[in-house]
Image (spheres, rainbow, N blue to C red):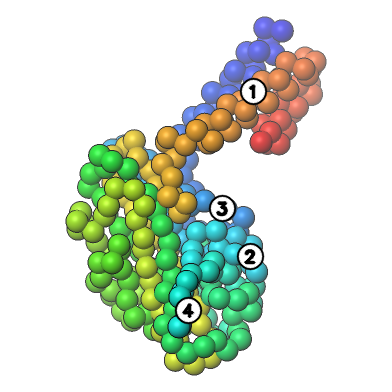
Amino acid sequence: MFIRGFVAAGLLMAMSAAAVSAEPADSQGHGHGHAQQHASSSGATVSSRVASGLAAGGSNDPNVMVIRPGAGSATAAIVCSSKPDAWAKPLNDSDWISTAADCTATRDAGQYRYDIKFNVSSGTTGVSLSGSLLSDDNVVGVALNGHALALNGSGGPTSPATFSTTDQSFFVVGANTLSITVNNASGATGLDFQARVQSDNPTTSADGNGTDKDNDDTNNAGEDNHGQCVSEAAHSTAPGPGHGEAVREAAHNCD
């Protein structure tokens, strides 16, 4: 019993250390299946990443709403399941989105405004925002809580435009809204973007759902349940050559 408990405790310590130190790498491709944005901290800096297309192709984007030309309300943007050949590959860990899954189809001409929210907790200092985007057709503007951001380039389906701000007056405590407006002259239309929010406050992190991850009771409960699940597997498996493998499988399969 002592040996099994010791193995379980060692495994849980290793998993906790990995969770603290690891940050999702920025790699070319799609972020399918991730309902929340990535958040991490390093030293005295908190870094949270927001991006488009964090769901399977054809699904609603869990973090982005879009207002179509002439529409009075927003609807969920949809991750493209098919794209025009002329569009560039998505930016790192993101995907193209539009108002329908078939992004090759002709859409109404006019302006499409895409909104994504992220959270800034009270007491956060030194906040900054930077990002890049691809669009079809051109980008009309990028705004943070209604404040226009300087845009480097006009966007397009092949050449990314970039934007950034360190103006603290643009940020608010609580939910912040990043808005990207794309003009469609004719034909297909879509948007692909990624952005990073950073601050000097190591106790604050933001995600696309507007929640403070460090104070999210649901996330904490999930971590406790996972550790209990792994511990129970370690205690219920007889000592021997298969004990370590059983614990590793439990660490992988436990919710």
| Residue 88 drawn at (x, y percent) | 51, 77
> What amino acid type should be assigned to the residue bearing mark 4?
Ala
**For the residues carrying marks 2 and 4, which lies nearer the camera in this image?**
4
Q: Quadrant of residue 8?
A: top right
The disc label shown at residue 228, or none: 1
Q: Please give the name of the residue rendered at 22% of the width and 47% of the height, measured from the top-left corner.
A: 126
> What amino acid type should be assigned to the residue bearing mark 3?
Ala
Q: Quadrant of the N terminus?
A: top right
The residue under label 4 is 71
Helix, strand or loop under label 1? helix
The residue under label 2 is 59
Helix, strand or loop under label 2? loop
The residue under label 3 is 35
**C-alpha gap between disc 4 and disc 3:** 26 Å
Q: Please give the name of the residue rendered at 68% of the width and 10% of the height, measured from the top-left corner.
A: 3
- Closer to the camera in the image, 15 or 223: 223
Q: Earlier in the sequence, mark 1 or mark 2?
A: 2
Q: Quadrant of residue 41?
A: top left
**C-alpha gap between disc 3 and disc 1:** 24 Å
Q: Earlier in the sequence, mark 3 or mark 1?
A: 3
